[in-house]
Image (cartoon, coloured by chain):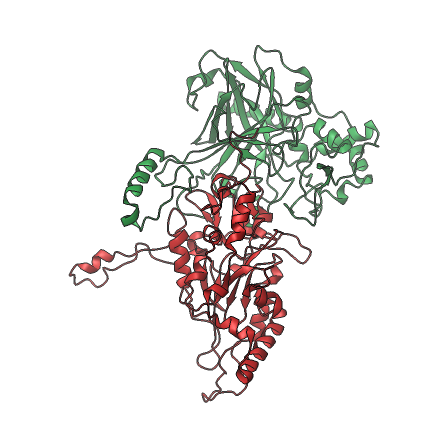
Amino acid sequence: MSKRQLAMVMDLNKCIGCQTCTVACKTQWTNRNGREYMYWNNVETYPGTGYPKNWMELGGGFDAAGDLQPGVIPNLEADYGVPWDYNYESLMTDSADHNRFQPHISPTWGPNWDEDQGAGAFPQDNYFFYLPRICNHCTNPGCLSACPRDAIFKREQDGVVLVDLDRCQGYRYCIAGCPYKKIYFNPKISKSEKCILCFPRIEQGLPPACAQQCVGRIRFVGFLDDEESQVYKLVHQYKVAIGLRPDYGTQPNVYYVPPTESPAKFDAEGKIIEGSTRLPIEELEKLFGKEVHGAIKTLKAEMKKRKETGVSELMDILIAYQHADMFRLDNNYYQEVAKEQKRTPLAPVDTRYIAGKFTKAGGHH
Amino acid sequence: MNKILTSLLSLGLACSAALAADAAITAVKVTDSLNAIKADSAVWSKAKFSSVTLYPQTAIEMNDKKANALCENAKAKKAQVAALYDGSTIALMVKWADGTKDVQKGPTSTEYSDGFAVQFAGVTAKPQPLPYIGMGSVGRPVVVHLQKATEKVYEPNGNKDVSTQINRQQTGVFEKELADYDAKVVALANTDYERVFVGEGFRSLTEIKDGSVKSQSAMVHGASGWTGTLSRSLKDDYVNLSGTVPVSIAVWDGSKMGRNGLKNLSAWIAINLDGQKSNAALVADLTTDSKGDATKGKAAAESNGCNGCHQMTSADPKSFMAPSLKNVGGYSTASYLRESIVKPSAAIVPGYNRNAHSNTPWYNLEKGKRISTMTDYSHLSKADVEDIVAYLKTLKAEVE
């Protein structure tokens, strides 16, 4: 466990699946140099196959006894999908051939292949919601446990989980070990890479790109031990934000406010079934464990309170009025950390990320 | 006819070699410079090849489900090894059968390349006992030369350098930088995977990147499999090779998703530098088997409860506390086994499958020193220890 832990809360009631976070992350980090296929941030439709395909069935994580479980490494083409591009130039020529506009490969799979399909029968009881996912920067990371080279480390100052690219030899056990499949293999440099929680931004007091750009303002960022942070209030005070698949035993640090609102079902005549809800509670229990019941109860009660009295701190937090309140990234704290480590405060990147945590100049001795 | 006779003879040799430790290899002294030696260099005609057995590494198991299934009950392999040396350089050739040429290329996440490695014992005040066979042990460093099968392809970032990466979409901003970068990439467009590491035990392997080790390795695939060559200086900051040189060889099979621990490796084998005074004690240690009684040893191992923590054979359930011993007889020397029984903390090997997991530690820290969780069996009689060693030496997979 690190000294402090930076965490993110995502309010699933407000995610509209616009993928702005995905694009913010992609343009910042993964549109080049072997990372093209990676989505450090993705938004998938739940229920659905997810990204990579059926990631929940690929193993990894820890069992109840705390033992690392074997896992399967997804295939780039079949499970992630090879990014394809189009011959846009062909649209500029006046041709009778309507099939001239083509992708450069014949796509067989890709992220969001089943977007918005969900489950159930239309129009009676079909349903889905969006599940945005980044690396959970776990307190007990499966990737870190699986690495036979000590190439993965968790930063003391904020618990961000990073790959030491100098030590990484591309064995990919980390991918098998991560139950969320949020660490990826870069075939160009033959090393693993993952979400870095935008630490170069964080160290300068900026939230991760995905959180800053979110148009639904669903993402809160702050330190879990900072009682003034909205992250602390949502996770520890109101207990309405829960980690994804806590049964994997990695103690994830991305928390979700579960979706509470879903429309009622229709009967065979197309009439509303009063008191029914489309979102099966079993699905939420699968994703968030038993704690989801308490979270939903609190959310409903506070919603009612707000309706009746006009006052609810929890609802005010979830309305997300001000970025300044949603993101508490104590910039001064990172300046102090930098001074302690005898580095220039506000260094743009963590030096270990480039040079390697255990590598000393001049070799081993 | 001659061919048949030779292959029959070599078959006979292979069979008898499987029973005993591999014989010492003679490094023939040559006057040619070995710095730029390649697999097809004429000087190899002077070399004497010896058979070396490579056993599947099963002490620890990694967490890749598919790879583990592919490597389940893997067999031992034979490699032909020869060595040459001149005044300053030693060269090794390793030939092993591998029907498929696996070279990692293109955008793929689930393919692995074939490879080979040669491990040398590092410089220490006390060269014996030798380092632990699996990447050395604390205070007993090893130097590992690793070559993976690669093909020369154009790819940006050939220098594995993340700090110079530029977003190609932003040509307006980075036009000059992109041009510079492309020029640099053209100059670097070589993805040869040839690395040298130094290590003192599991997880400690660190790449030597300062150029202080002068070496050169390559792999060539032919009809009968791979031929790997390595040449390195006899003496540098990390090794000092003279007289008898202990080495061990490992090979990886990409078609079985081999990488890291999923490999076949030899025990320490002795290479005598021809014309130099050999280390008779070391040669004897690496080439003679235990004089103990394996049958008595099996009974002694059972009565002392070895299988309470260790998996002894494939028939036993996997135990997560300690390394599996089902191939320990293949890649361990008798002296290592002897030492491990009476001084378990001398070289600490991680548990079978738990990697870094805190629930099943393979050592405790006492005053900053790693102490093995294994019981000390120094109270056993010398004869009992010798019998157990003889039994452990029988624990190994058969040759493919």
Residue found at x 74% / y 41%:
B373
The image position of residue B270, as x and y in percent, is: 61, 21
Residue in the image at 59% along x and 60% along y = A226
The residue at the point 48 percent across, 70 percent down is: A320
Q: In this view, does B105 lie to the left or right of B206?
A: left
Q: In this view, does B77 lie to the left or right of B300?
A: left
The image position of residue A206, as x and y in percent, is 45, 56
Residue A111 visible? The answer is no
Q: In the figure, residue A209 lies in which quadrant?
A: bottom left
The chain coloured red is A
Chain in green on the image: B
Can you say whether A329 is above or below B276 in the image?
below
Residue B213 at least partly seen: yes
Left/right placement of residue A237 relative to residue B226 reads right
**Res A228 → quadrant:** bottom right
Left or right, residue B359 beside residue B150 = right
Image coordinates for residue B364, horizontal then vertical, percent: 73, 41
Tally of numbered tags: 0
Q: Is residue B92 or residue B80 the one in the foreground?
A: B92
**Up-down: is A112 above or below B96?**
below
Say which of A72 and A61 sits in front.
A61
Indicate the quadrant containing the C terminus of chain B: top left, top right, bottom left or bottom right: top right
Could you say which is closer to the camera, residue B228 or residue A239? A239
Q: Position of residue A216 (x, y in %)?
A: 43, 69
